[in-house]
Image (tube, rainbow, N blue to C red):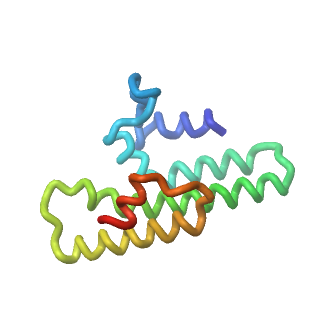
């Protein structure tokens, strides 16, 4: 599955490249491209899972996990454009940002089994 994900993120419209520094992580622009194309990424991953020769129970578990992660990524993708705004947010944009953050926090807490890291805590609670 890893190779399929790499193939998707390297092609148009994403065109994200691993940073040669910092253990190959993505820079901010590449992260933005990934978030703008969340549906495409998860569509590719779902196709790969369905094409693999797996036991049916394994496929259902993997698809459930992908669905959970897709909800988290989609809700975070709503937050990021307003966080990256170079201008002062309007009252409506500020309200939208708070709503998106609450939705992201709720989605993350419901679907993830991972701990909330300090950056997410700051986003959820202090923003």
Q: Is residue 49 left or right of residue 5?
A: right
Kindly identify the residue that appears in the image at 36 percent across and 61 percent down. Answer: 123
Q: Is residue 15 above or below residue 91?
A: above
The answer to which of 40 and 114 lies nearer the viewer is: 114
Name, please, the residue furthest toward the right: 55
Kindly identify the residue that appears in the image at 27 percent across and 61 percent down. Answer: 82
The picture places residue 93, in percent across and down from the top left corner, at 23, 71
Q: Quadrant of residue 18?
A: top left
Which quadrant does the N terminus fall into?
top right
Q: Is residue 122 above or below residue 44?
A: below
The picture places residue 23, in percent across and down from the top left corner, at 46, 27
Q: Quadrant of residue 25?
A: top left
Q: Is residue 12 above or below residue 83?
A: above
Name, please, the residue furthest toward the top: 20
Q: Quadrant of residue 92?
A: bottom left
The picture places residue 29, in percent across and down from the top left corner, at 32, 41
The answer to which of 33 and 21 lies nearer the viewer is: 21
């Amino acid at each position: 599955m890893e190779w399929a994900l790499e193939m998707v993120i390297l092609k148009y419209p994403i065109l994200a490249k691993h940073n040669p520094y910092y253990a190959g992580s993505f820079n901010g622009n590449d992260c933005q491209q990934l978030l703008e194309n969340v549906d495409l990424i998860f569509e590719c991953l779902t196709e790969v899972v369905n094409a693999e020769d797996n036991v049916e129970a394994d496929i259902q578990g993997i698809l459930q996990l992908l669905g959970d992660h897709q909800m988290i990524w989609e809700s975070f993708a709503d937050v990021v454009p307003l966080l990256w705004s170079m201008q002062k947010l309007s009252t409506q944009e500020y309200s939208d940002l708070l709503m998106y953050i609450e939705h992201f926090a709720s989605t993350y807490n419901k679907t993830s089994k991972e701990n909330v890291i300090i950056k997410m805590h700051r986003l959820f609670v202090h923003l």
